[in-house]
Amino acid sequence: MSQRDPIRVFVTHSFEDSDDYLRVFEYLESARNFFYRNCSAPDQRPASGSQDALREQLRAQITPAEVVIALSSMYPAQQDLLLFELNYAKASDKPVLMLPHFGREPLALKAFQGLVDATITWDERALIDAVRRQA
């Protein structure tokens, strides 16, 4: 990892910025000597808005990533979309790091079994170390 070869990161989203989504990038930006490229683009919601179009756009964003950071805060409202992103990441042999909803304990859901490589806490160093290790 260097400025010329940054780690490519995808953060799960439902085509909108959430507090947890933005917080991930605050943590990544504040790390010293850590270079990354954001592959996720929540502002690129397909015009048609169909499930197939949403999924195709997510596939295009996840494919170049080296590591996927999953936000469990998406689960209550966007369960299907989050599980699609996790399943596609695993089918593409991408490591998945799960972050709990900020300020809460991690969710131990059966739906996540086999889809998550590591669950980490909201700690800048833990996040950066996990991304480096998995990428």
Image: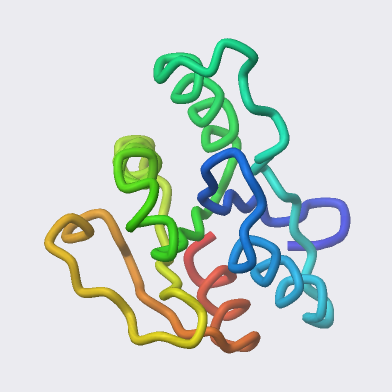
Given the current orientation, which residue lies at the most extreme top position? 48
Residue at image location 70% in from the left, 64% down from the top: 22
Q: Is residue 47 above or below residue 15?
A: above
Q: Is residue 110 above or below residue 88?
A: below
Given the current orientation, which residue lies at the most extreme right position? 3
* Quadrant that contains the C terminus: bottom right
Residue at image location 63% in from the left, 27% down from the top: 45
Q: Is residue 70 left or right of residue 91?
A: right
**Chosen colour scheme:** rainbow
Asked which quadrant contains residue 109, the reply is bottom left
Q: Nearer the viewer, residue 31 or 98?
A: 98
Q: Position of residue 107 (x, y in %)?
A: 27, 74
Asked which quadrant contains residue 52, the reply is top left
Q: Position of residue 27 (x, y in %)?
A: 71, 77
Q: Is residue 112 left or right of residue 56?
A: left
Residue at image location 39% in from the left, 64% down from the top: 72
Q: Nearer the viewer, residue 122 or 65?
A: 122
Asked which quadrant contains residue 75, the reply is bottom left
Q: Position of residue 91 (x, y in %)?
A: 30, 36
Q: Is residue 31 above or below residue 36?
A: below
